[in-house]
Amino acid sequence: MDWFKNLLKYDDIKKFSQENLPQIPYQGNELIYIPTMMGERAPSYNEKTRGLFYGLSLNHSREDMVLAVYESIAFHLKLIYQDLKRLNKNKEVELIMTGGLGLTDYFMKLLSYVIGEIKYIPDYEQNTAVGAAMLGIKVVDGISYPELLKHFPDYKVIKNNSDSEFTSYLDSKYQHFCRVYQHLQENHEILTFKKI
């Protein structure tokens, strides 16, 4: 997201989201973004895959592109979440988010429509370190996440699935995202330009 923020020259992602993106639920578009700008790391590994916008036309705006980035990051997290569920024998996996786009209420609301209930810690200077420490304490000491969250009184819980039409739109777009994503994973060599 930092790359995209710098490319489109906006400084404050929270402010940009509040002022320029449509309220959730919104009327979506067909634009898909595949967020593998530095290769794919999860749920599969392929360092040679690169990101792309699919369906981009002259009718799309900067806001459409930012919205596609938000949606596609949420869809990509859903791919990872589904792998975690499979590893957990299809039991629900509790999500606690820190850092990055988790700092924007807009993205967390969108993600809750895609995945379900999300707990997130909105604003700490070292969010990545906080997340890693929480995971380490959970694994080593066996402390439950509710117990850990008591140390973060400002954490938030979001669950938004009350709009069935919007949920249906996101489910349909997620399936399309998966097809484009899978095609890119399987055909990255054909799509990659090779210098002579």
Image (cartoon, helix red, strand yellow):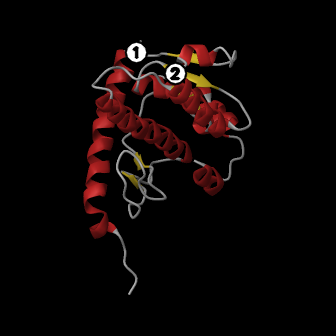
Q: Is the C terminus in the top left, top right, bottom left or bottom right quadrant?
A: bottom left
- Placement of 115 over or under 147, stated as above or below: below
Rendered residue at 33%/32% (across/down): 82
Label 2 belongs to which residue? 142
Is residue 83 visible in the rendered image? The answer is yes
Closest to the observer: 71 or 150? Answer: 150
User: Which of the marked residues, 2 or 1, is nearer the chain's N terminus?
Assistant: 2
x and y percent of residue 171 in the render? Answer: 32, 29
x and y percent of residue 113 in the render? Answer: 43, 23
Rendered residue at 33%/36% (across/down): 83
Image mark for residue 143: none
Is residue 23 visible in the rendered image? The answer is no
Rendered residue at 40%/25% (across/down): 115
Q: Residues within 10 Å of mark 1 (few under 14, many from 20)?
A: few
- Placement of 122 over or under 149, stated as above or below: below
Question: Which SS class for mark 1?
Answer: loop
Closest to the observer: 150 or 38? Answer: 150
Q: Residue furthest front?
A: 141
Image mark for residue 163: 1
- Placement of 97 over or under 35, stated as above or below: above
Give amino acid for label 2.
Gly
Q: Residue furthest right?
A: 125
x and y percent of residue 50 in the render? Answer: 42, 60
Give amino acid for label 1.
Asp
Closest to the observer: 108 or 62? Answer: 108
| Inter-mark Cα distance, 2 to 1 | 37 Å
Quadrant in the picture for residue 99: top right
Question: Which SS class for mark 2?
Answer: loop
Q: Mark 2 touching mark 1, by CB under 8 A?
A: no
Between tags 2 and 1, which lies in front?
A: 2
x and y percent of residue 29 in the render? Answer: 40, 38
